[in-house]
Image (tube, rainbow, N blue to C red):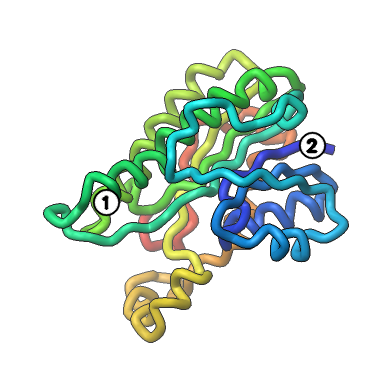
Amino acid sequence: MGKYIVLGASGDIGRQITHDLLDAGHEVIAQYFNTCLSELQEAFNGRAVSFIKLDLCKPLLQNPFEPWMINHVDGLIYAAGRSYFAELKDVSNEAIDEQYNIHFFNLIKCVQYTSSGLLQGVRGRIVVISSIWGETGSSMESIYSGFKAAQIGFIKSIAKEYARTNVTANIIAPGIVKGRMTDALGSDVADVIEQIPQQTLVKPSEISFAVLQLLDMHAQSVTGTVMRINGGWYI
C-alpha cells in the first residue's frame, strides 16, 4: 500500500485522515507539535504510523524529513492550520508571521522537500485542506482568509506545473467543521448553523472521505480542483 505524510495529524481533520489512511492499510508519517506524543501513540497503538514533531508556526528553512520518509512517498496531505480572529488594525507582526508560516510558507517548503519522492512513484498526490474563507473571505479573519486564498492559488499553479508528471494537486475547502474549535464556541455555534442550508456542521470524516477519493488511482485526471464541502453554504 501507500506511504503518506500528514501535516497537522493531531488536529480533528488530520487525525481523522490519519485513522482512515491506516484503516485502508497505508503507512503514515504524522506531524504534530502541541499534542502530547504519548496521547498520539496510544490513539494509533500498533498501527503503521511514525511521528515527526514540527512547529509549523516557524519557517522550515531546512528539510526536516528523514530520507526514508520522502523516498517513494505517495502523497503529501497538508491539514495544518490555526484560526485567528482580530480586526486588521489589531493584527501584530508576530501573528502575521505565524499565519504566513503555518498556512503558506511551510506548505510551499513541504511541497519542495517531498517533490522528488512524489515523482518517484506511479502516482503522487498533494492534497491541501484550505477553507471556505479562502474563497469568500471572512470579516475579522482577513489574515487567515488571505493565506487560505494563497493556498488555493499555489496549488492550482502546482497542478499546472506538474501536469505532465504523475503528480496531482488539489484543494479541499471545508465550511465550519465540527470539532474542538466549534465545541469551544458553545451556544454561539447555533447562530452559525442557522446560516448553513443543510443546517449542520461538516464532519471530519466527510473531509477524510474526500481526501481518500483524491488519493485513489482512478483520480489521476483530477488535478487543480477546489472541492467544496460546506453543506451548501457557498456554491
Q: Residue at x 56, y 43 (%)?
A: 54
| Front in this rendered view, residue 31 or 232 | 31
Q: Residue at x 67, y 24 (%)?
A: 118
Q: Quadrant of the N terminus?
A: top right
Mark 2 and mark 1: span between their CA atoms?
35 Å
Pick out the residue farthest to the left: 89
Position in image of residue 222 (x %, y %): 58, 33
**Camera sees residue 115:** yes
- The correct choice, above or below, for 25 with respect to 42 in the image is above
Q: Is residue 161 left or right of residue 83?
A: right
Secondary structure category for the residue under label 1? loop
Type of amino acid under label 2: Gly
The percent coordinates of residue 86 (x first, y second) are 22, 60
Residue under label 2: 2
Q: Is residue 210 above or below residue 120?
A: below
**Residue at which label 1 appears:** 137
